[in-house]
Image (cartoon, helix red, strand yellow):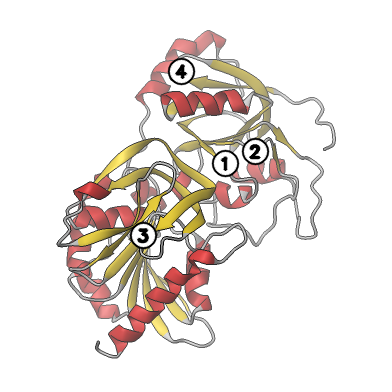
Amino acid sequence: MALIKDARPAWLVLANGQVLKGRSFGAQGTAIGEVVFTTGMTGYQETLTDPSYYGQIVTQTFPLIGNYGVNSQDYESAQSYVSGYIVREWCNAPSNFRSEDSIDHFLKRLGVIGLWGIDTRHLTRTLRETGVMNGAITTEDPADRLEELLAQVRAYAVTDAVKAVTCPERHTYTPENVRYRVVLMDFGYKRYIRKSLMNRGCEVIVVPASTTAEEIAAIAPDGIMLSNGPGDPAENVEIIAELRRIAALGIPMFGICLGHQLMALAMGAKTEKLKYGHRGANQPVIDLASGKTYVTSQNHGYAVVGESLDPAVGAVSHINANDKTCEGVRYTGVNAFTVQFHPEAHGGPLDTAYLFDEFSGRMDAYKEGK
């Protein structure tokens, strides 16, 4: 990479009192958030525009970020929802035939404060040992206001996350050859979920998270997709209550990430906060029906407690090969199945795309009255 000259200083202030000094890129100022790490080697543009990172300061464990630049095609949403961004090094001379700009300009354009030049291995180990914690990125020397800043950091909490990222009104996206009509409940959805549905002939009606069962029934969809999204799933009390009524419609439902968690809560199960979450493109997941292990893309800090699921309602279908947490549920009482990982996001193989095919099969059966 080319040398980066005259970089301004920047600091990371952690809730445990630790202060790490590095250098600034992206926007200037101070931002507070929950500090997390993600292990992906690529996909940084998708990470920065993923609504699931709302309220979080994201650390990349891979040491060099930005080498293939950014472009106008790989946005997962129209803006960035991260509170801040931390890397070991960033590349100011990207090389790729799709590259249109550098990550530095990208962050400036989106108003995201960046920090580079710290030991991200040390930070990752800290988060792995103690769990995710709050922090602040600042381009202003915190020495004279450290106690005040620490008080703000320790008091911070990610709240009303879904309300902050969901769309305010309905949008319809129609492919050339329509086979199905799908309602996509927007809890903070990634655009590639919509694209994956449209690639399978789905007319996609994106609706706000507050949409009611009556409103969905009036659309008369063939299927309902529950999207990913940010925050503590259990705080969405009204959405959870409405999902019970939506499930009672009998329309095929497919949930991803937060949608998976919300559906489980609606069906009487519990969720828990993980120590440092699953974030990256290399999470191994076992499909209990086939015994196969898939490498999946994930981004979440909470998980469904599999043991809390009533066997009469549904059964755990997938587990994480590392920590054995619940990665999927197939329901028996309602026409629904959900997964914690992102089957539409993949680092190469299309292994978990079979889940979209299963969704299509369920919609075919529903349309035929089976």
Q: Secondary structure at mark 4?
A: helix
Foreground residue among 271 and 113: 271
Tag 3: amino acid: Leu
Label 4 with label 3: CB-CB less than 8 Å? no
Q: Could you say where residue 366 lies in the image, as x and y percent from the top left?
A: 29, 84
State whether residue 76 appears in this view: yes
Counting residues from the start of the chain, the first of labels 2 and 1 encountered is 1
Residue at image position (40%, 79%) is 360
Counting residues from the start of the chain, the first of labels 1 and 4 encountered is 1
Mark 2 Cα within 10 Å, few/some/many (few <14, many 20+)?
some
Counting residues from the start of the chain, the first of labels 4 and 3 encountered is 4
Q: CA distance from mark 3 to mark 1?
A: 25 Å
Name the front one of labels 4 and 2. 2
Counting residues from the start of the chain, the first of labels 3 and 2 encountered is 2
Quarter containing the C terminus: bottom left
Numbered-mark total: 4
Q: Which residue is mark 3?
A: 288
Residue at image position (71%, 44%) is 66
| Figure check: 68 above or below 369 | above
Residue at image position (68%, 33%) is 25
Mark 4 Cα within 10 Å, few/some/many (few <14, many 20+)?
many
Foreground residue among 13 and 165: 13
| Residue 62 disc label | 2
Q: Could you say where residue 192 lies in the image, as x and y percent from the top left?
A: 53, 64
| Residue 218 disc label | none
| Residue 39 disc label | 1
Q: Which residue is mark 4?
A: 149
